[in-house]
Amino acid sequence: MPGRLVRWLSAAEPDWDAVYADQLPRVYNFFRYRFGVTADAEDLTARTFEKAWRARHRYRRDVAAFSTWLLSIARNVATDHVRARRPLVALEEAATMAATGTPEDDAVRHSNGERLAVLLQSLPERERELLAMKYGAGMTNRAIATATGLTESNVGTIVHRAVGTLRERW
Amino acid sequence: MDDTQLNSLRREPSPAFAARLQASLRQHDVAPSKVEWFRLRSVAAPALIVVAIVGLLSVPAVRASAQSFLALFRVVNFVAVPVDENRLARLAAENLDPPHLIGEQLQVLEDAGPPTSVASPEQAGAAAGFAVRTPAYMPTAVYPSGIEVKGQQHIQVTPNTERLRQVMDTLSINDLEIPQGLDGGIVDVRVPPVVMMRYDRGGALAAQLLQAKSPAVSLPNGLDLRALGEIGLRVLGLPPIEAREFAAAIDWQTTMIVPLPANASSFKQVNINGHPGVSIERSSRAPNGSSRFSTVLLWSADGMVFGLEGPGLSSADALRMAESLK
């Protein structure tokens, strides 16, 4: 009989507390980048984790796979949110934000984060989503490519273009 | 615009929110909705194994029937447990072996009947209620030779605490308590139709592929699955400490216990296109003295359970066939 007595053929149950602590900021920031500070990132994050928790028996039990799987749920939640909501920030407002006052004034009126959030809303959906995955969820281009079905070079191109647009409007 | 600015939108979730959400998730665990609770219970197939005194697992495992695996379990993960056949023999001598015990408590509400031959995977899919997958890869000289569909089966098992205690006494398991809530409850098992595809080589069976939606198993509410699991592992022959540790670590709602056949020569965890599975190779001695081997491959994917087995089917070929399913 192989083995001593018992061998695992599957990964053990993850440490859910550790997984939660590790993944919560990634999902939360994904939504902040995706929808800006005006969106209810907490609500969307909670929805994501509740869906994931209910369906946790379906994912492969290793943490790396879990992060990808969790982000796929977050993306679905984001899609549902997009369908349900009205645009949060008009493009004209974003343009106005980008052009207002001196840097000092801007610093007073808006933090960099708030300003970035508004500018992100002026980007096309696809670019915004990829930036949310990269800077919000902290994913690599390769991981984003795997999650979206794009090629890694395509991801890099889109992200580069989107950052260029933000830089111009900053 | 630099990375600092690009990262300027990042914030740590507030501790209050993190704590609130975590508490909410835990509450889901403690008091899920009725539907969710049923669903969680529905995937508790391994606990059924325990209720059934692990026999429905061990017997088909020892006899190497992948079909029996399919007919019993909803699988997400796999854990391999060698079976102490001497213990099962002791139970059989007392008429406490699983077939006896389960036969006493079994009620068939819907009989699957004999398998029905169909002409194509499409017909099989229509009969079974799901899109049947077929392998794009087949080993050299292997060809499809038939498809059968086994109908749905619905059975109920009434656990009997007294008989379980007899099993434990026979095996001198006297340090564990049978958890409350078992006696008088009903284990309800609905086994969806199973599609069985046969592949031959030179007119003889080369491989058999089985696929089915995961069975739905409901258990009496309030059962301590971990405690039942520990009893089941001890019945299988695990030492007390290991049984306790494994019972605590296993997710009994989603993990399939795979008892290793006595003639298993090797087994390993496999990954079928991102889905977990287990591959067991068995060897036996042919009448002419030569060694024969066969492979049993079990995996789950997308709510479906698959089994692939065949005499002379190598582990590598089984894996390639499994990965090529379309």
Image (tube, rainbow, N blue to C red):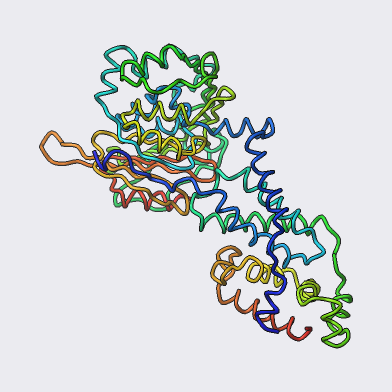
* Residue at the extreme left of the image, as rendered: B289
Which residue does the image show at 69% across and 69% down from the upper left? B10
Residue B264: give x, y in percent of width and height: 26, 39
Above or below, B140 against B161 in this view is: below
Toward the viewer: B320 or B279?
A: B279
Number of labels in the image equals 0
Query: Seen in the image, is B255 located left or right of residue A20?
Result: left
Residue under the point 37% across and 53% down = B320
- Asked if residue B99 lies left or right of residue A55, the reply is left
Can residue A162 be seen in the rendering of this structure? no
Residue B322 location in percent, x, y?
A: 41, 49
Q: What residue appears at the point 47 percent right and 50 percent down from the top-left corner?
A: B275
Q: Position of residue B272 (x, y in %)?
A: 43, 51
* Viewport quadrant of the N terminus of chain B: bottom right
> In the figure, is residue B200 to the left or right of B126?
left
Query: Can residue B318 be seen here?
Result: yes
Q: Which residue is drawn at 63% across and 48% down?
A: A52
Considering depth in this image, is B274 or B170 the residue closer to the camera?
Answer: B170
Q: Where is residue A125 in the image (x, y as percent from the top left)?
A: 74, 68
Residue B225 higher or lower than B250, as above or below: above
